[in-house]
Image: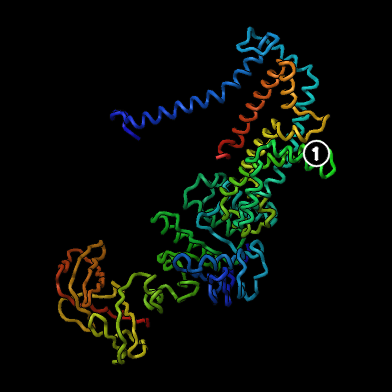
Amino acid sequence: MSDPRARPDWEAVSLRLVFGLLAAVALIFLVAPTLVILITSFTDSESLRFPPTGFSLRWYEALLDADQMQRAAWNSLQIAVCTTLLCVLLGTPASIAMARSRHPWIRACDVLFMSPLLLPALAFGFAGLIFVNQMGFRPSVTFLVLGHTIVCVPFVLRTTIAAMTQLDPALLDASRSLGASEWTTFRRVTLPLIAKGIAAGAFLAFMASFDNVPVSLFLADERTEVLPIHLWQQIESNLDVRTAAASGVIVMLTLGLMIIAERTAGLTRQMR
Amino acid sequence: MESRRGHELHLAGITQRFGDYVAVRDIDLKIGAGELVALLGPSGCGKSTLLRIISGFMPQTEGKVFFDGEAVDHLPPNKRGVGIVFQNYALFPHMTIRQNIAYGLEVQRVPAARLKTRVDEMLDLVHMGEFAERYPRQLSGGQQQRIALARCLAVDPKILLLDEPFGALDKNLRLDMQIEVKRLQREYGITTVLVTHDQEEALSMADRVAVMSRGRIEQIASPTDIYDRPETLFVNQFVGSTNVLPGIAGEMAGAGQQVTLACGERIALAEGSRLATGAQVQVSIRPEHLTLQTAPLDNAITGVIKAVMPLGPQVLYDIAVGDGTDIKVSVPRKRGDEFLLSGTRIFAAPVPPAGYRAFPV
């Protein structure tokens, strides 16, 4: 690199300055709202005001008695877990097949499976509702999970395909030539080497399902309320401070999960 | 321990097409038990395709593969008993060295007690015992290659395939590993096919070399014969370097046939040439098979030295002959030798038993 005693390279300095400023602005816009809601959630007053007048844990205590909110959170968690399982079970084999093939219609499938990321989810949710009705069914938890799976599976696909392309095909040939069947090769070589990619995708799919609003809006039945929609309704009707506390819990849980994912699977490395 | 007698490999009429493209064309090749044959050729000559056919990863379009006289075409790669050492070694990165070597034995359900002795035996064989608990990424290239070989030999394959195995090693290590691999191959008496584009590797290691070009075997012979008695111009040019001079075949004169070169000289070919009189030919002579002298020589090409390049153990002379073509002559150098000077008019003639060889155009 450059010698520190040399004359400053103004072009490099200004470039770094501009990018540094942009990064700082982006960081503030990303992090600030989360911080505001976190701080607000510790307020001691009855209203959602920032900055809070005093510190208390009363709204977190109140969460313990918020039956409806807890039920919504439990629903969301169950749906997210089922969705994640389905995404992994469907997404992993699909990724392996797509990563290995260069067939043109496989490329088309890739685009098709990724399209939920690009399509407005609201349109997809609405279309899903009409489709379910056309088939003569009512919206239900089953359809909700299916709908979530369709919009969340791209995360598993992307990270697993990325892991597959990192996988040296010679390793699979080596395993086969040493006497391993295709299944044994998959179990003992392919799977351990792409596991981190799958795990990263599963994490993203879980988070995407957990806070999905547009699909849940259309495909949930009347009895199944999910957390993000419940929170929205609380805010809309009575500016409930408990929503801030609930958000606080979600933010902290997410942070914890991210740290675990980063430590074990190297989440950010899998997404590159 | 299992019998160390090698197995015979026979490729019969192997052809491989990819659409209209013929990658391998009607290959017949018999490799004796315990023999090491190198498939040598430029990239795209079909050598890697042949390797995939032998190992069972690619079903051939036509022809049959026999091990000890038995067709193996119906056997998938995991049932064929072909061990492969890959160019990048392909060690499993998530397994330790011990686990890598044990892998083949485990998937073939070798009992635990025998598995352990076998793995230890293989570690000893390649002198890597102290590295057993390390991971491949903690090893150097040469060490990884030894493990790849040990992993392969652990399951006692019938045939060993070496796919450009020394390409990733630096030059000094490469020679050491070639000697090492050759030793193990001898010790095991395992029938081996070495695929390479590196002529030195092929010539130094193989019992026989098959030079391939455009899906065919141009010549299969001992390294000495490939070098000294190439049968085609391609072999002559691909293995070592050579001077090529166009000419027209003439009458037989004594033992060798006469050729009139485009540069005006008339020379006599080495014994055994039988070319149609009047045919267009390419005459070939290697730089190190020529001697230089300022006094007239028999069967010589005359020219003027254009450049003198001292290359350490040899001196390379660039010589202009007649019609604007150049030939190169390489002369071994002893301490204190004087160079011939640029501009000197000289005579260049083959040193017996070498001679001019001619190939029809």
Q: Is residue B344 above or below residue B134?
A: below
Residue A219 lies, in percent from the top left, at 77, 36
**Extreme-top residue of the structure:** A53
Residue B237 seen in render: yes
Q: Secondary structure at mark 1?
A: helix
Q: Residue at x 25, y 65 (%)?
A: B314
Q: Which quadrant of the structure image shows residue A263? A: top right
Residue B47: x and y in percent read: 50, 67
Please give the residue where the numbered disc 1 appears in the rendered image: A142
- In the figure, is residue B270 to the left or right of A137? left
Q: Residues within 10 Å of mark 1 (few under 14, many from 20)?
A: some
Label 1 lies in what chain?
Answer: A
Residue B44: percent from left, percent from top = 48, 66
Residue closest to the eye, B310 or B157 = B310
The residue lying at 82 percent from left, 45 percent from top is A135
Judge by depth and name the residue closer to the eye, B32 or A52.
Answer: A52
Q: Quadrant of residue B243?
A: bottom left
In front here: A22 or B32? Answer: A22
The amino acid sitting under disc 1 is Thr
Query: Relative to B115, is B336 above or below?
Result: below
Q: Quick check: B176 above or below A39?
A: below
The C terminus of chain B sits in image quarter:
bottom left
